[in-house]
Amino acid sequence: MKWVYLLLIPVMGMSQSYGLKTFIDAAQKNNGQIKAKEIRIKAGQSSVEAAQSAYWPTLDVGGSYSKRNPNYLVSPGVEATVFASVNLDLYDGGRKSAQLRAREYEKEASLFEKQAFEKSVTLQIVQHYFGIKQLQANLHALQERSKELKAQIERVKKFLRTGLATQEEVDKLQAVYDNNRYTMENTKLRIETSRENLSLITGLSVSGLKRNYFQEPKKVGFEWFDGIKILEANAKAVGENAKAIDAAYLPQVGISDTYYRSHFDDQLSVPTVPGIPSLSDDGFIIDHQNELKLEVHMRLFDNGKIAKESEAVRYRKLALLSELDHAKREQKMHFRLARQNLRTVRAKMKSAKSALKAAESTYRTIRKKFETGLVDDIAFLDALTQKTLAEARYKETIYDYEIKKSIYYYYAGKDPKEFIR
């Protein structure tokens, strides 16, 4: 029995059903596009750390080796030098602080970008999830219709053998049955397509779907969604970049300390003259030196180059602010429409329920009359079609209402995942 159980484990795993939250959580862990956003956030953090490091002194080391031939009397033919230099900017007009703030705003924008993308992925999952349920409801209605048509074909064939029905009646029912089978297969293909898309987004093998729904919207507060926050952060970053460019017109003050150590060789041999230092003495050639330097410089004229660069960046900020204003008005518009859409779907759901009730009642009556020969096959098929469509439309409306609720939460600036029940 143990080996039978072991064989059943993979089958049980493949047939496992998942809920809407499970799909969303899996997408946040497995989706390659979301992972790319996470990597961009890390890049933004490294950029911030690099801007912070700009405040620290720099330490440089280096060396050189040169050989001259012929060489001057006071210049050695071979010279090897090493040095170490410490540099520190005392004042840069606020350039580094502006660059740091710009990098922080860019990182903030990347965080909002990831959140916004996650919410958009959530909407995709919701649409596929309830879209599959809609298609499954349609398929179930079509399957019920297929069973009914098959039963009626068998019944009419019996009447045909006794001369109480015609071949034309059988052929009509058979044609409707075959068309229904085609619609079923097409619906199965659409279900499989949606499952594959859902699997691509989430990384999970989609088999069964658990029952989930969204909380009924009540007193939902409005807030700007992440796309608007991205524009705000980007506009601030661009503004700081403009300030960093403008800093070039202010005084730049720096201090440095450099220590050199040299070794000389291949010096010319000159007779020593009493009272005059020889070439080998430190008075002529120094083999070590420390240089402390304070440097101040300021740009006085560049024919407007820096000013134009700053102006170009400021225009980019103005463009982002214009996009921001439009995005805010657009979100408010979509939020109002989403709220109206909920009311519309509620009315549609009520109407679909009434239509289903009426179609079922009509179908029961027509079916009894058809089986007793009081109505023809056209009336029966029409009643069956109306009942099938009414069942499918009612289920579709129920699931469409769930999709519309998720869209409403999205345009309210919320994460739809928080309202799943």
Image (tube, helix red, strand yellow):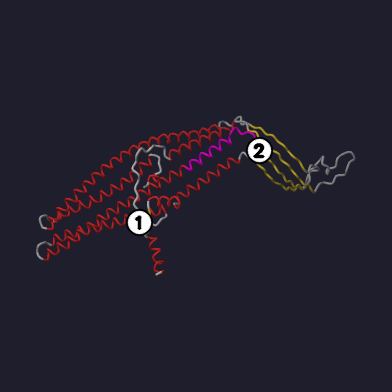
In front here: 231 or 402? 402
Q: What residue would you read off at disc 1?
A: 208
The question of residue 327 being in magenta is answered with no
Task: Name the spot of residue 9 as percent of width and height, x first.
Answer: 40, 64
Mark 2 Cα shell of 10 Å, populated few (<14), some (14-19), many (≥20): some
Give the percent coordinates (x, y) of residue 56. 63, 40
| SS majority, magenta | helix
Q: Is residue 128 left or right of residue 252?
A: left
Say which amino acid is labelled 1: Gly
Residue under the image location 76 percent in, 41 percent down:
289
Q: Is residue 17 above or below residue 421?
A: below
Spot occupied by residue 394 in the image (x, y as percentages of width and height):
25, 48
Q: Secondary structure at mark 2?
A: strand
Residue 98 is one of the magenta-drawn residues: yes
Query: What's the residue at 40%, 67% (across, down)?
Result: 5
**Residue at 53%, 38% in the rendered image:** 102
In percent of width and height, residue 275 lies at: 89, 38
- Specify start and end residues of the magenta stretch as a single range: 89-111
Q: Which badge, 1 or 2, comes first in the chain's sequence?
A: 2
Q: Is label 1 in a helix, a strand or a loop?
A: strand
Q: Any mark on residue 304, and which? A: none
Mark 1 neighbour class, 10 Å CA radius: few under 14, some 14 to 19, many 20 or more: few
Give the amino acid type for the residue marked by disc 2 in the picture.
Answer: Leu
Residue where numbered disc 2 is placed:
88
**Residue at x-position 17% and y-position 50%:** 361
